[in-house]
Amino acid sequence: MKSTFIFKAVLHNIRHRLVSFVISVFAIGVAFTFLSGVGVVSFGIAATAVNTSLRYPLVVGPEGSSDTQLVMSSIFNIDKPYGTLDYSVYEELLRDERVTAAYPLARSDSYRGAPIVGVNSSFVRDLSRAYYLYEEGFDGQNPLPENDLHRAVSGYKIAERFNMQIGDKFVGSHGHVGDSHAHVHDDFEYRVAAILEPVNGPEDYSIFTHYKAVWAVHDDHSCDHHHHGDDHKHDHETLTAVLVRTVNPVATAQLEGEYSAKPGSTAADVGRTVRRLVEYMNKAEQAAGFFSYGTLFIVLMMVFVTVLMSVNERKKEMALMRTLGIGRGAISLTVMIETMLITVSGIVAGLIAGHIALYFAKPVIDMNLGIDLEPFLFTAIEVQGVFITLIFGQILALAAMFRIYSMNLIEEVSRD
């Protein structure tokens, strides 16, 4: 009987305070939507960075590059390379006994915001041996042959976004991603020869060509000699970076020191740089979390104030309940349940809205950050937010309950 009364009383209170109830739920929901976005995006960046650092422990780039810039431009393909690196550095690394694999990178163009990355067949083969689609006669062991510099292999997500089909032709724009001064290379056309299976990394959002195609595109003369194996040296035979796999961490540290000391080059330990980036991201996530928690605190205080205002408005109603034999504990409990309904509804609405928003924003976020976002991943910062909100909400509810419990409703009503 008492539980039925409490349930009906709660529903009655919510109906009569529907606008403030909805506003309170909405405010909590917005804070949790933001919290979901921060948690999932931070996790996606960190996971991608860590996975890639295991694949390529060292990156060598042009002198003057910072570690962060090297990693962001060569691993994530979302920053502009600092300059160029002489091709001989790549050849020297290949001959080093401490190096098990080295992959050249040449970047200077993009296509509709996607980076066009000059690599070699070994890089593509090492990245993924599987292809989603490929043209007739395509050789998976030699996907980017030097005798066909117009061939391109597209990452899965880029092909999906731009609806690329096998055999489609396109031209690149000079300049890196986001360069407002880019101009189109109308005289050099690429052909989509294959589309990679998803690798769940920044490579899904890149287009790969042979690194000599990058040289050919920017050669002031005819590109024909490149197709006939002419080894003529020209100004464009440079790289932007070399990804290096070493025999062990000691070799990584040795090579980093040596190539950072050499004129014309610098090197970065990808693992150490990534750990530093992840630390920065964790700090940013914590700062964003504090901002969200601050917002939640303000919202919950607003809920507390509106509940107290509601209590004052319903003093006569509560006094009538007391004359009907309803105890102060039961009346106070309605306030606690009402506050819990507001906080729980706000949390659930915010989490659902946040993850649905991430699902629809995933293509844009993935493209711009070079990550593979998991929109329905539930992160630690969200769990913390849920616990903090529930606990703090109930503390406020207990304060409101104490207010009701300590009131002499008959005197309050007669005073009015």
Image: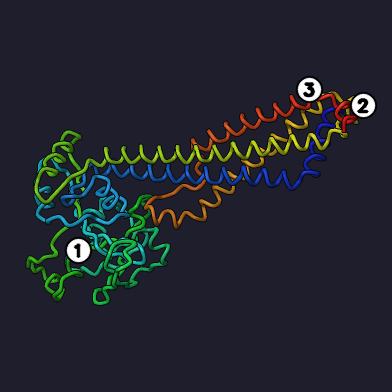
Cα–Cα gap, marks 1 and 3: 84 Å
Name the residue carrying label 2.
323
- Please identify the quadrant where the C terminus is shown: top right
Q: Earlier in the sequence, mark 3 or mark 2?
A: 2
Report the residue at 74% width, 48% height from top. Answer: 19
Q: Earlier in the sequence, mark 1 or mark 3?
A: 1
For discs 3 and 2, the disc positioned in front in the rendered view: 3
Q: Is residue 9 above or below residue 81?
A: above
Q: Amino acid at mark 3?
A: Ser
Badge 1 local density, few (<14 within 10 Å), some, or many (20+)? some
| 68 or 76, nearer to the observer | 68
Q: Name, please, the residue furthest toward the left.
A: 232
Instruction: Give yes or no for contact between labels 2 and 1 (Cβ–Cβ under 8 Å).
Output: no
Cα–Cα gap, marks 2 and 1: 91 Å
Q: Quadrant of residue 287?
A: top left
Badge 2 local density, few (<14 within 10 Å), some, or many (20+)? few
Q: Secondary structure at mark 2?
A: helix
Report the residue at 29% width, 62% height from top. Answer: 176
Name the residue carrying label 3.
406
Q: Quadrant of residue 363?
A: bottom left
Name the residue carrying label 1.
145
Q: Is residue 398 left or right of residue 183?
A: right
Q: Amino acid at mark 1?
A: Pro
Q: Secondary structure at mark 3?
A: helix
Report the residue at 11% width, 72% height from top. Answer: 225
Q: Is residue 65 above or below residue 190?
A: above
**Labelled disc at residue 34:** none
Residue 298 point in image, percent of width and height: 60, 38
Q: Amino acid at mark 2?
A: Thr
Q: Earlier in the sequence, mark 2 or mark 1?
A: 1
